[in-house]
Amino acid sequence: MLDHFHVPIEDQVRVNRDDLHRTTADIFTVMGLSQEDANLAADGLVTADIRGCETHGVSNMLRVYKKLYEDGNINPQPRWKITRESSAVATIDADGSHGLVICPQAMDIAVEKASKVGIGAVTIHNSGHAGMMAYHAMRAMPHDMIGYAITGGGAIMVPTFGAIPRVGAVPHAWAIPAAKMPPFVLDISSSSVAANKIQLLRRTGARLLPGLLAEEDGTPIMETQDVPEQTRLLPWGSTRELGSHKGYGMAVIGQVFSGILSAGLFGAINPTETGSQRNGSQFVAAFSIDAFRDVGEFKASMDQFLTYLVETPPSPGNDRVYYAGLPEHEETQIREREGIPLHREVIEWFDSAARELNIEPLAQIN
Amino acid sequence: MLEHFHVPEEDEVRIMPDSLRKTVNALFLKIGFSEKDAWQATDVLLLSDTRGVDTHGVSNMMRNYIRMVGEGTINPRPTWRITRETPTTANVDCDRGLGIAVIPQVMEIAIQKARETGIGAITMGNGRHAGMIAYHAMMALPHDMIGYSITAGGQSMPPTFGSEPRLAPNPHAWAVPADKEAPFVLDISSSSVAANKIQLLRRMESMTIPGLMADEQGTPIMDERPVPEETILLPNGATRELGSHKGYGLSAVAQVFAGILSHGTFGPYEGGHMSHFVAAYSIEAFTDVARFKSSMDDFLKYLRETPPAPGHDRVYYAGLPEHEESIDRHNRGIPLHKEVVDWFDKTTAEFDIPHLER
């Protein structure tokens, strides 16, 4: 994440990963999840925080999830099932499950299939928000596999040339293991900026960069100005000339693999939905490296490739060149050591939630 | 393609697809391709030209291919072979065969695997130019499958924050069938603009627009100015703030699936070396095919019926403009630049084959 999206130092309270995991899992348990499912969902959330992907960690998401469970919009005890299956493929009806609960289990099925036939792919419908997609993709890596994950749903982004939103900012994530180098982990939305970062810009009073957003009528805003009241998300690329059809296209193909392939879902329309979060759909896949090439050789090649990339001489004004997953890996090492910096407002939320739900309060690092 | 990349009307000569096919096929045979490979390579070029993807059609590519066969970098008679295989996967050594001849034959194997298991995916090393990669993905369509293809190799694009090129604008392509609607076909490079389009802008003395390219030190050019002598491609997104790490990332993913997974290749071109990856996903394995296609119709219609933003007539989806162009070009012929037609006349005379019919 860019610096200006981080919690200001004066507002930070640090907590340990394990403590955050415990309290988060406790909250999920009170919401009615089994201990196993609560641990899965908590691991997904806390992994986002430990990697520095705060947008998808406990701060923004846990209170949303809690409310969705309380309102009956996510099923805490889903009886999800495979509705169609072949040796490499499965389709899952998630029975209203949280995405953070069903996706890791679906990825485990994909990994199992990939270990037998080379590739496994699972499409999922009738599920909720899936958290940080990288988490699900990364689950394939310890098996020496490449992981791929998509989450579809919603209509918050305008198509190129369009005036109203008709696709989600559908993210795709890939996770690829190396030997000594930190893994390559790419998790990219198909919009030019995430919706909740707009909120943040508005809150911090920051100015808008050209190409970040569209006017209410879909016209890309191409000059620096204050964030307008009403805006639209633009596809990655911003304008047709700069490649917004690429972001738009990535959103559509993501929706096809998750929503259309599983249950014909797209847009804001869903005739069967009972809650706004049930329009969720995902796709996960695992590619066994051994099915293509010797694993040891592959990982050694990855090390060489990633080293070649980070050793690119930086352009003027920049210190370093990164690759996807490297900053998150470095952030993880810092946060494992020093704790996860939460905004004090988030700590207050945890304290009040702990009192309300009658669970142990979240321990802080002194 | 954007309007200003098309052949100006006063310079165009219309050629019917069948005439072009005859001449191109004869040329491939003359430079040593087998009947099968010549037909296949011709079919890929013709689809590019009928779909209006002129950058990857005969105009730019045919002379390159002839030159590369002459120089010995393309093997006109490759003995490509599978070096590793599972029920869903394979690794193919292309034996320096031209991608537009070899990749479609490999895609047939991926389709066969997908018919049996649900998915087929094949990585290819030691290959040569792949042409318009949408072609390879689109081969899955008649089989009620989703097709995917990648080609990777070389370096003309810097990583985000980098000052020298270490990756290529490696493209990804997907093709998804619908029922009545034209198929969704997305074929996107990971750079913000293709290198040969920068040449074109320079030739036409057009101005750059902000975010289209970087100066020779890798700094994104964020104002309007004449195209400098030396430029570097930028990853799509142009700057980190606008998501250039996404273009950089997609390029790296492509390099992994094609180059690293097949033979561990990345970095500079060696004799035109390209790596490829194709995959086919059987729709039947996931859901009912008829239901899927009718959902696709609903989805694509929903997208193209989005009310347009001020200043625009229509909203498209990927593959729709190319589908419409294809109908038009089958009726009225393919507009080639007169310089290209001259090249054909000179070359057919040189190879002693019938000239290109107008």
Image: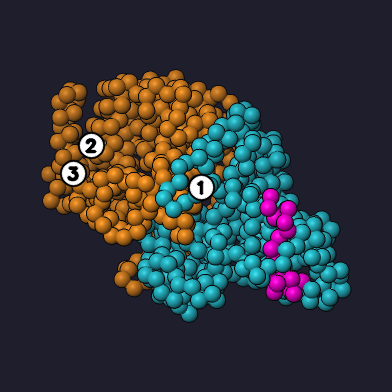
Task: Kindly identify which residue carries mark 2.
Answer: A19
Give whichever of A356, B326 is nearer the camera: B326
Q: Quadrant of residue A153?
A: top left
Part of the protein shown in magenta: B327-344
User: Mark 2 and mark 1: span between their CA atoms?
Assistant: 53 Å
Return the chain for callout 3. A
Which percent across, then down, holds residue A17?
Answer: 26, 41
Residue annotated with mark 3: A343
**Magenta segment: does it hold A134?**
no
Which one is earlier in the sequence, the residue at label 3 or at label 2? 2
- Of the residues shown, which amino acid type is indicated by label 3? His
| Residue density around tag 3, few if under 14, some if 14–19, many if 20 or more, within 10 Å | some
- Where residue A48 appears, as percent x and y from the top left, is 33, 43
- Nearer to us in this view, B197 or B77: B197
Color theme of the render:
by chain
Q: Residues within 10 Å of mark 1 (few under 14, many from 20)?
A: some
Vertically, is A192 above or below B336?
above
